[in-house]
Each structure stands twice: as C-alpha cells, then as structure tokens.
Amino acid sequence: MNLPEPFGARLRRAMDTRGPLCVGIDPHASLLTAWGLGDDVAGLERFTRTVVEALADRVAVLKPQSAFFERFGSRGIAVLETAVAEARAAGALVLMDAKRGDIGSTMGAYAATYLEKDSPLFSDAVTVSPYLGFGSLRPALDAAVISGSGVFVLALTSNPEGAEVQRSVAADGRAVAQLMLDRAAAENEGVAPLGSVGAVVGATLGDAGVRLDINGPLLAPGIGAQGATPADLPAVFGSAVGNVLPSVSRGVLRHGPDLAGLRDSAARLTDEVRTAVAG
C-alpha cells in the first residue's frame, strides 16, 4: 500500500516555513458579541469565514473547537465542514479539537469521522482522550497512518482539574501522564523528521515534571488569555521545545473582525515563539 506523506512530516515542514503557531477557531458567544455578531448560525459563519480568510494562507495550523459548532446542530456542523475544506485548500493544516475517546466500534466511528479522507470533516489531525486506556485509541492511530493524518493525545492539560487523573500514579510507578507520553513515543519510534502521534501539554505548567521527548509534536495550549507567554516555553518543554506547537485562541481572535488585526497578532506571536525556541 502506498501511504500518503505522514502528518508529522507535513507539520514539521509547515512549522519550519510558516512558523510554529496554532490558532484556535473558538467562536465563543462572548467573542461573537465582541465582534458585533449575533450568537446564531449567521454570526458563527461570518466569524469562521473571517478567521479562515485572515489566517489560513499564513499560519501553520488552524484548530477549530468542534463544540462551538456542534451547539448549533446540523447548520453549525455545515459551517465547520466548509471551514475545514477552505482552510486546508489555503494551505493550513487543520487540527480538529474534538477530544474524542471511546472504545471499539465507537472509537472506530470517531476515527472515520475525522481521519478518513472521504469524510466531510476529514482533518489533518484530531485531539483524542486516552483515559479509557491508550489501547482504546488504536482505531484512530491506525486510521491516521492510512490517511497520513495525526493524533494528539491528552497528556498534561492546562486545566487544574486535570491533575486529579494525569498526575496520579499508575501500577508501575509512573505518573499516568508519563505513561501516555511513553506510549505516544513508542508509536513514533524511529520516525523522521517527526512522528505523527502528538501530545497535549499545557504551556502554563512551569516545569512539567515529565519526559517530553516523544519524537512527536507537543501541542501547548495556554498562551495568551490563560497566562503563559512564548518566553515560558523553554522552561516547560526543555530539550523538546523545538517540537512544540503553541496554541493560542483569544489572544489572536480578540483582534478581529479586522483582518489586519488578526494577521498582525498572529505574526507577532509567531515571531515571539521563534525567538523563544531559538534561545
């Protein structure tokens, strides 16, 4: 079987050429209001099209948060489908922030939704939750290999409640988060230039206290509104900082609906990340 170019290779190239930044498409009701839009499907569509128009031809990754589209039902999903297609056509990689996690045929259906090329919501990568056991992700991991997509596994998230599970100790003495990171690393072993199984590690954690050298991308939410800055990245990620993909949403989106404002804020953050990573 001739497999497509893996997501890890495509992401590495996008980060090197466009810069290491992921911008979320998070149409909160409050953001729609701030943009002078209604909290309805028309407002959702206008908001989403504006973000895609402003950024899809210049940032490495756009990350729509599925929940903000799902809340409008089928019409919201239709907006999401269009956004995914138009963003990818403009050259951005699309990371669907869906955080799906289940077992067996249900996990297989989620994988088909986001990771099979004939799906209307086919994306370059998807976020998944491994807390029904890492092995429960196998349908998504296998589907990603076939389609050349990626999977980002929740490991150490930026919300304080996450520590209840992620910092707990597994039977072998490892923190649960470390167990998930090690399993991701095993999936990426021997892959160059970058594996396609990433992990989500919050940029607000300070010293993460885990080994992050998974040979895969590290999605780092928390830049901007949650309090972290690009300058914090080396302290959190150490020697793995070169594989970090910082994620920012409100820090960029609050500059809309002006296209130039969105573009300037994204460009400024990209430069700040490049400087921080270069040391």
Image: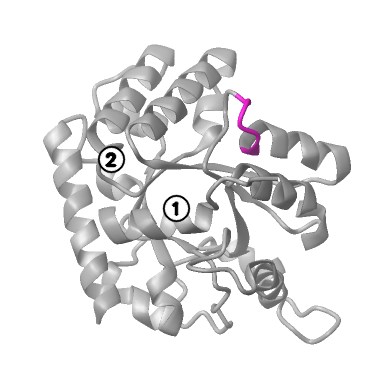
- Dot 2 and dot 1 residues touching (CB under 8 Å): no
Q: Where is residue 182 in the image (x, y as percent from the top left)?
A: 68, 75
Task: Reply above or below: 252 against 182.
Answer: above
Q: Position of residue 143 (x, y in %)?
A: 71, 44
Q: Position of residue 256 (x, y in %)?
A: 21, 34
Disc 2 residue type? Leu
Magenta stretch, residue numbers = 115-119
Query: How many callouts does the rendering have?
Result: 2
- Which residue is identified by label 2? 253
Which residue lies at the image location 48% right of the left edge and 68% below the top edge? 193
Residue 175 is one of the magenta-drawn residues: no
Toward the viewer: 234 or 70? 234
Disc 1 residue type? Arg
Determine whether the residue tagged by mark 2 lies in a helix, strand or loop: helix
Q: How far apart are marks 2 and 1 (CA)?
A: 25 Å
Which residue lies at the image location 47% right of the left edge and 83% below the top edge? 207
Q: Earlier in the sequence, mark 2 or mark 1?
A: 1
Q: For residue 27, say whether it is visible.
A: no
Residue 254, image quadrant? top left
- Which residue is identified by label 1? 10
Task: Reply above or below: 99 against 110.
Answer: below
Determine whether the residue tagged by mark 1 lies in a helix, strand or loop: helix
- Mark 1 surroundings within 10 Å by alpha-carbon count, few (fewer than 14), some (14 through 19), many (20 or more): many
Which one is in front in this view, the residue at disc 2 or the one at disc 1? 1
Toward the viewer: 143 or 170? 143
Name the magenta segment's main secondary structure.
Answer: loop
Query: What label does residue 279 carry, if any?
Result: none
